[in-house]
Image (cartoon, rainbow, N blue to C red):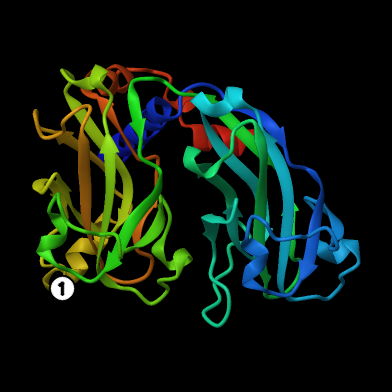
Amino acid sequence: MKIQLTVAFMIMLSHMLIAGSPKREINLRGKWYFELGDIPAYAEADFDHSHWEKVRVPAPWEDQGFPGYDGYAWYRRTFRVPEKLQKKSLTLALGYIDDVDQVYINGQFLNGRGIDAPHYVSAYNQRRLYQIPGNLLKYGDDNVIAVRVYDDWGEGGIVSGKVGIYSQQSSGTTVDLAGRWKFRSGDNPGWAVEDLDDSGWNTLVVPGRWEDQGYQDLDEYAWYRTEIILPKTMEDEKLILYIGAIDDADELYINGKKISSKGKFPGENFREYNRRFYNHERFYYIPGHVLQPGEKNVIAIRVWDSGGDGGIYRGPVGITTRQEYRKFRKSHHYHHSNFSYFLNDLLD
């Protein structure tokens, strides 16, 4: 029963954070520029790819003149984002990629699945659905997408699926926290404080496994931080933070104050105990006056990983009102409300 309720809450919150039916706004099927090899400059927004060959997306590269090729290759293309999409939540759908991908928009890392050599882990059977933070896009202008693909054997490339960018109308009652967060491995209680200078920290995409973002060998502690400004309209609301699924245990701090946790700390003393929480959804009630609408607020999350995957790996991630939370909790339409599940069905 507990598992059923957790799944129902996850579906309900997904609807609140990504409201409305998905609509393909930008069709990315068709010809993409394509080049074998692996050069970091291929990710840059202003790289000149005009001399590259063109291949069809989606389709295995073996079927397009590259039989038997295993290794790295890059895809690139431009796309225009209408200004009318600025108020909508956008998700990039890249179908299935064989085996490993890293996606960049306008030169900025977006997300990826799998791990390339020498610690190869294939993600050939995982559908790629990546939420796009609005600050990565140029509205009313051309944008550049670059996809780095590693294929270990068999078919390779962006092989199948309804590739495109999908939109959902924002509900207006939530704050979407998906996107780039500050990140640092290790552990220091001082990293929870509001006025910490974290300018030297790295950045990771949330949600997303940290193994897919350069931390393949990281087990044990790490911290996430982000700054938000709540709209004044939420000033008198009771709020709930949904932080998705975290592998394995976590502690939540807002403006330096500990709010809640899942699992036990210190993590090294409870390794086996904490492993049970990797697939639990986090719903945290935020006490009144902790968040200050209209002002800068700092969210810090301490994470302990007992081994294997780690980090805030599955969303959605955001803040909503308790009224909306309770309303959708009572809804009987859970099966219509999870955008990720619905989009998966749509793209089959």
- Horizontal side, residue 91 vs residue 310: left or right: right
Residue at image coords 25%, 17% = 233
Q: Is residue 138 visible?
A: yes
- Horizontal side, residue 218 vs residue 163: left or right: left
218 lies above or below 315: below
Quarter assignment of residue 183: bottom left
Of residues 66 and 48, the one drawn nearer to the viewer in this rendering: 48
Quadrant in which the N terminus is drawn:
top left
Of residues 108 and 246, the one drawn nearer to the viewer in this rendering: 108
Quarter assignment of residue 156: bottom right
Secondary structure at badge 1 equals helix
Of residues 94 and 274, the one drawn nearer to the viewer in this rendering: 94
The percent position of residue 240, horizontal first and vertical second, equals: 22, 31
Q: Is residue 133 visible?
A: no
Residue at image coords 20%, 39% = 297
251 lies above or below 255: below
Quadrant in which the C terminus is drawn:
top right
Residue carrying label 1: 268
Residue kind at label 1, given as amino acid type? Glu
Residue at image coords 72%, 46% = 78
- Horizontal side, residue 142 vs residue 203: left or right: right
- In the displayed image of the protein, which residue is found farthest to the bottom? 118
Q: Residues within 10 Å of mark 1 (few under 14, many from 20)?
A: some
Q: How many marks?
A: 1
